[in-house]
Amino acid sequence: MAEERRVGTVSRGIRCPIIRQGDDLAQIVTESVLGAAKAEGFELRDRDVISITESVVARSQGNYCSVKDIAEDVKSKLGGETVGVIFPILSRNRFAICLRGIAMGAKKIVLMLSYPSDEVGNQLVNIDKIDEAGVNPYSDVLSLEKYRELFGYGVHEFTGVDYVAYYSDLIKEAGCEVEIIFANQAKAILDYTKNVINCDIHTRVRTKRILKAAGAEKVFGLDEIMNAPVNGSGCNEKYGLLGSNKATEDTVKLFPRECKGLVLDIQKRILDACGKHVEVMVYGDGAFKDPQGKIWELADPVVSPAFTDGLIGTPNELKLKYLADNDFANLSGEELKKAISESIKAKDANLVGKMASEGTTPRQLTDLIGSLCDLTSGSGDKGTPVVLVQGYFDNYTN
């Protein structure tokens, strides 16, 4: 009889060479994973998950654009006069460089910031101060003067940046006039201009609908800026500037273009090399919230832009605590273990709504595994843009 496995899910960061444009990423990932397995003395198994961070995928694709490319796209789509830029996130890495390009493509920007925080939880002002000031964030539109009078010059808790001043200066430095207002109703911008770029990520479809219904003339989401090449640049047909990052002071690394072929290629290479059927995915930001700063991590439009078919769907798990405390409260030791094992083996293919699955996590597998991988690889200098997750699909009976 085989010895019982004592370890469940394991997440390993896999070190890789620095990826450059044109590199054969499928080969590099395959060799890095197989090399790590040999060096560390572990074996690949069926249903292991190999995850590749989106940044190296985009880099290997050479998917970049310049601020000049952004400026040209904005000018051609919105006319180059006054443009409303609404609901951007507060980020030097994610949005500031895009804003520079947008400003270079307009004569005046009316920048409308949501308050007390942006879409992903970056705070402009403490919610308690909003209450104290008697301001209703759902209806009140504040000018820059009124905002400063009420709330002064606060800086972001983690970055130490006053984003109001930072974005204002950035627009002016691009040779563009700027007016800043604070509001949470999309249609508030239409009192200033009928040409709008809505920069929200996860609420963008609703925002566009509201603006168009309220009489906006030209409405483009960030997903519709740089959604086709400009002067031979990179682009992202589906997400445009969403999911982009600052590369240099003048260039933006865009979210990866179509990469289903990449994950299928890696899956096949691993099967050919060692006979194991692994799953493969590309991941960006994880989907989790920081309890201290209240920041919700997901600044990318999706956690995973490409994955093999075995990662479609949600977990189908029983809650061991529930079984132990309810169905088998009178059992212990080997009897309890056997009873729970039998329940798992006999579980329904779909446990939605069943009490024994209450408290499990019915999120998309790619969102769960992508979040695990994002935390494993980190955002700094770990040098592990590939993550191998083993045992994720195991349960208590394996």
Image (tube, helix red, strand yellow):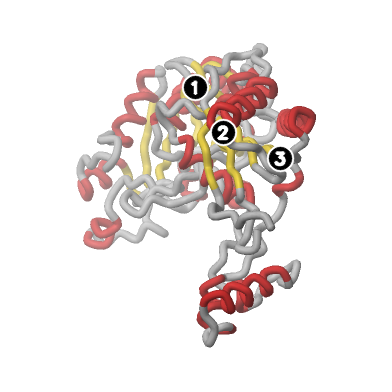
Image coords of residue 2 (percent x, y): 67, 55
* Image quadrant assignment for residue 50: top right
CA neighbours of label 3 inside 10 A, class few (<14), some (14 to 19), many (20+): many
Kind of residue sitting beneath label 1: Gly
Q: Secondary structure at mark 3?
A: loop
**Which residue corresponds to the image point at 42% horizontal and 16% vertical from the top-left?**
249
Image coords of residue 53 (percent x, y): 56, 32
Kind of residue sitting beneath label 3: Val
> In the rendered image of this protein, does residue 121 appear above or below residue 237?
below
Image coords of residue 158 (percent x, y): 29, 39
Q: Which residue is mark 3?
A: 278
Q: Which mark is residue 41?
A: 2
**Which residue corresponds to the image point at 40% horizontal and 43% vertical from the top-left?**
113
> In the rendered image of this protein, does residue 85 appear above or below residue 209?
above
Which is in the foreground here, disc 2 or disc 1? 2
Q: Secondary structure at mark 2?
A: loop
Kind of residue sitting beneath label 2: Gly
